[in-house]
Image (tube, rainbow, N blue to C red):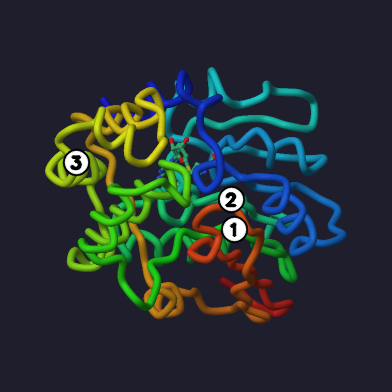
Amino acid sequence: MTHWQKYHAAWSKLEAPLRPNADTLSKIRELIGDISGPVLLLGVTPELANSFDQVLGVDKNKAMIDHVWPGDTAAKKALHADWLDLEGPKNHFAAVVGDGSLNAVTTLREVRQLLQRVAALLAPRGRFACRLYERPEKPFTEDHLRQMGSRQATVNFHAFKWQIAMHLAEGGGASMPVVLIRERFNELFPDRDKLARDTGWSRDIIDMIDIYRGSPAIYTFPSRREFLDVLPEGISNVRFEPCGSYDLAECCPMLAFDKNQAAAI
Ligand SMILES: C[S@@+](CC[C@H](N)C(=O)[O-])C[C@H]1O[C@@H](n2cnc3c(N)ncnc32)[C@H](O)[C@@H]1O
């Protein structure tokens, strides 16, 4: 069972960088600007569903739609589908938005395919904005992780989990099975009570890493160069913009671009 099928139960305990905060939301609205027309949301992130007037949220996990999506209305609907299977309607959406969505597919090849789909689904001059989890140029080393776990924490545990994931993704072609994040964490920090004492992270939050046990989900943590390599044809005004000052915000830029007026994709 993928952890997304049970993640909704832990939703209220998640915070930035795993969830969008007020800075992220206002940045996405700023990057999308004044649009009229339907917005495709890659996922069911409720804060993003609530940020636009006309929204189609697409998620392949029914439990996320049932428990996290704010509910269908005349102007907002959720569709149970895989983003990579979305064939149409082409040239239709005024905007496509997401929070960490490009990282939720399993390989760089799938990130490329997803962005090609996005470009095809956007209306001419339609806009894309999505928060990324971007592997830093200077990798998080094992030494850094061990040190982080041995003294009063300077970032929340979710940010630390992502540092472990980015450390592992460095050697794995950017792809990262979530089970490995937990396994590596257990190897580095076998005594969770000590970790809690040393860092100040609560056991409750530390134990949330167990949600990855047995999950077949794979995330992708590309570097800037890898993101640039998978951008689709027919787009312009590509921006990577920093956003916010929350924990690990330096690894969470916003990617935005516009579909060209004349792009026939
Ligand atoms: C958008 S991402 C990141 C979560 C985000 N930080 C948030 O606050 O919503 C998570 C969602 O993507 C969904 N997902 C992952 N891969 C997908 C795919 N290929 N097609 C559709 N949904 C997918 C998962 O089911 C999950 O609900």
Checking the image for residue 189, the label placed there is: 3
Q: Nearer the viewer, mark 2 or mark 3?
A: 3
Across and down, in percent, residue 18 comes to: 50, 43
Mark 1 and mark 3 lie on one chain; the one further toward the N terminus is 1
Distance CA(mark 2)–CA(mark 3): 33 Å
Residue at disc 3, secondary structure:
loop
Residue type, label 3:
Phe
Judge the density around disc 2: few (<14), some (14-19), many (≥20) Cα neighbours within 10 Å: many
Respond yes or no on whether mark 2 lies under 8 Å from ligand 1.
yes
Specify whether 75 is left or right of 199: right
In the image, taking residue 83 as reference, residue 15 lies left or right, namely: right
Q: Residue at x 32, y 65 (%)?
A: 108
Residue 179, given in percent of the width and then of the height, sits at 20, 39
Q: Which mark is residue 3?
A: none
First along the sequence among labels 2 and 1: 2
The residue pinned by badge 1 equals: 130
Residue under pointer 2? 98
Query: Neighbour class for label 3 at 10 Å: few (<14), some, many (≥20)?
Result: some
Q: Is residue 156 above or below residue 34?
A: above
Q: Secondary structure at mark 1?
A: strand
Q: Secondary structure at mark 2?
A: strand
Which of the image's four quarters has the N terminus? top left
Q: Quadrant of residue 236?
A: bottom right
Q: N-terminal of the two: label 2 or label 3?
A: 2
